[in-house]
Image (tube, rainbow, N blue to C red):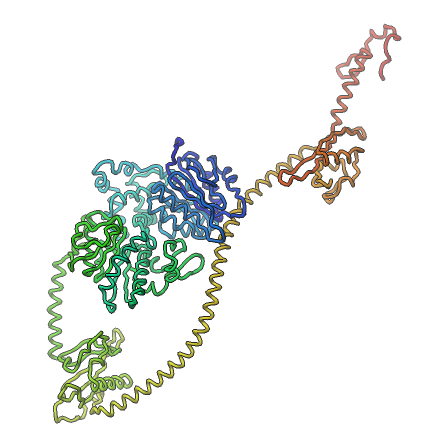
Amino acid sequence: MENLSKPTHIVGIGASAGGLEALEKLFRVMPPSTGMAFVVVQHLSPDFKSLMDELMMRFSTMPVKLIDSEMNVEPNTIYLLAPKKEVVIEGEKLLTYDRPPGKQLSLPINMFFRSLAASWGDKAIAVVLSGTGSDGSDGVLNIRDAGGVVLVQDPATAKFDGMPQSAISTGCVDAVLPPEEIPASLESILQDPLFIRNYGKDEGGEHDLIELEGIQKIYELLRNRFSIDFRLYKPSTITRRIQRRIALQGNAVSIDDYSDQLENDSQELNLLYKDLLIGVTAFFRDIDAYDALRNKALQDLLELVPPSQEFRVWVCGCSTGQEAYSIGMIILEELERHGRPVNVKIFATDLHRDSVTTAAEGVYSETALESVPAPLKEKYFNSLGGGNYKVSGHLRKLIIFSEHNLLKNPPFTRMHLVSCRNLLIYFRADAQVPAVTAFNFSLVKGGILFLGASESLGTLADDFDTVDSHWKIYRKARDSRAALGYRAPGSFSQLTTFDPTSSRSRADRAVPLTRVYQHLLDKHIPSGILLNENNELMHVFGDAHRFMKIPTGRHTGDVFTMLGQSLSIALSTALRNIKSQAISMSYRGIRAEDHEALIELTVDPVFDKVSGRRFYMVLMSDQQIGTALTPDIDLSVVKEDFSLSEESAEYVRQLQLELQRTKEALQTNAEELETSNEELQASNEELQASNEELQSTNEELHSVNEELYTVNTELEQKIVQLDRLTSDLRNLVDSSQIATVFLDGNYCIRVYTPRATDVFNLVRKDLGRDIRHFTPRIPDHQLESDLERAYQQQKSSEQEIEADGRYYLRRCAPHKDSKTGKVGIILTYIDITKIQVGAWGMIFNGLRSVFSGSKESADGMVQVSDADTDTDSKSKPERLS
């Protein structure tokens, strides 16, 4: 691929402890001409110089640049974050900022991923490698929301799996791979499948794509596995997600091949399902929208709902719960500001089970709470340590999380506020109609519908008044209930089939039978009431209402408030006797207020074997004048004449005893609780202070540990290089066969070669001793003066030395340490005997040839010719012996 002036993609790589090894494996197999730019963001110590750029040059042939100032990104280049810096990207420029001073927790990976998603959208790629903590897990959500790709190192291959596991837990990861397999996935991202590449070129492309056999097969597999009809979602969204999953397979495959793969690969089908459900959310997402909801709608809505009435809210598509908790917080704040009691119920629903589970747990990282105002964070979240926070109990108990399919399941009813933000944008236009219809059906008149900034009401706009057109806040204008039988075209029949005929026939059979049961009860059961074990009214038979009076105000279900004083005392006495003795009771001669005739009251216990609960049937009737108490035929029923004064006295006495016992028990409990509360409060304050200190210390140690681990890894690599270089130098010196002694500035021996023992009588324990304390085996009278000259004047000197027929070239040379600047001396002895002997032999033979005119024989011996004997011996020089 030719080197383009602009990168095709920006790959942001986040790494921490153990990341150097992963980076080495990744870049050793990364092709140098992908056209991408790679930005490596690590947790680096501000107190140490980073050697990462030097190490990275050994792993890759691509240029490696340190980001310490503003610079443009270029393709096929690796960019490394400098210590004490944080980096973001805006367009094609990398901008650096100084790291916040002090001991603040720094999350540079999240910061860069967010800017990368904002600037490069679907051309952004996030890679999370080995590291502790959770840095990067929130940033990958932004990458996913922008349509980018998220790759994570397989935790099994990471030295520290904290960062990979945290990223995987977000559910936004496209692939989990060993580092050496990531380059293949990055290359495949550049190769769009043909059916996707040509998508949308003509007007009918979207519908033509839906009709592809492979797409239909994928829809069918998803419906059978997860009971969701993804044909109701926008085709562009679905096909783009499928495209990315195909690209991540590592090789170019067709849509038909991929659909065949999904049949046998349940894990890949589950990953595709998660990818299609685009669960991106945040606390107070679009904070101005929440301000508009609170200021323009919520105040009027609270005035519409009386304090005694439950305020009901439905958050549809809640994902991992941030939106539901955000709405809960602003509602609680408004209730507190108006001094109203907390009588709120929030139903938060989503299609994805794992997201609902996460929302119900209510645990979020510190970075996830960045958009929560500090006062609300302190008030509604409790620190768990390790950078995690849990939703407080008084906020959590307001919300019920559950799975719910908006296009399949019936909506909730009697809602005062419905929030569905950024969900309808993923539906097809014909699927948005039943969704908005469900919201209209769910809301009461005057209720508020809160949509996303890019969503609208469509054909149901006439049913709502606009509160805020920009942030899409609407109020239900009239009390109408749109028909809910409609389902969007293309939905599967077994998911939406409704047979009104069969349903109506069952209702036609059930309703008359119920009316018959009621008629029989009214005719054959005497006047009475049915109570449960808590003395609450369950059913009224006959004309028992003649003996009762409904009180004004809020109804509590307590039957004693509906009876007069006499009946109330008689009933309570009978119930007390029945509960203690397990018998039936009957009283006669009860005189009630506003009732002329005397009343007979009978109480029978009724036990339900299935539920194990006990009920009480209370029969009330007029007593005939002149009748007296007759012997009871049923011995299990105790019948007595009722005397108000006696029963009242007995009733009061029992109540006084019970009240006394209760007061004593409460007093004892109150004293114990007060003492325990004081102790617990003191302990809690101490623990809270200790916890805050430990949390702060833990965060500091956690950050320092990651930085030290990175520095340690770099130093280990450097040590390996130094060991290798030292070994090479040692082998070089040993193989040179030259006597060499290294001296420091005090003429002390630092190191010597094995041949140096031929000159000095040295052993290993002599290291550190002054060389001048040793007498060389080779007489050398100028040694000390030459050593002093080399050290003081930093000048080299050479001297030829002869001893026992051998010749040596002795050198004294200074050397200077490049870092410390200290001066030392290198003393060498080179054996030049062969050179010297060879030179003198040549001179000797030459002289013989000149003076004797001799010739050398073939064997090199000097011989005299016969002609020489005839000449006058006096005219010739003497022959050299």
Is 839 or 789 nearer to us in this picture?
789
Residue in the picture at 45% in, 68% down: 684
Residue in the picture at 34% in, 47% down: 144
Is 258 or 297 nearer to us in this picture?
297
Q: Is residue 236 above or below residue 438?
A: above
Which quadrant of the figure has residue 635? bottom left
Q: Is residue 874 above or below residue 206?
A: above
Q: Is residue 521 above or below residue 759?
A: below
Is 428 or 115 nearer to us in this picture?
115
Would residue 17 be visible to someone looking at this image? yes
Left-right relation of 186 to 810: left
Quadrant of the frame with the C terminus: top right
Which quadrant of the figure has residue 413? bottom left
Residue 759 drawn at (x, y percent): 76, 35
Left-right relation of 507 to 875: left
Q: Residue furthest right?
A: 874
Left-right relation of 20 to 812: left
Residue 809 drawn at (x, y percent): 74, 29
Would residue 229 be visible to someone looking at this image? no
Left-right relation of 46 to 751: left
Quadrant of the frame with the N terminus: top left
Residue 449 drawn at (x, y percent): 23, 56
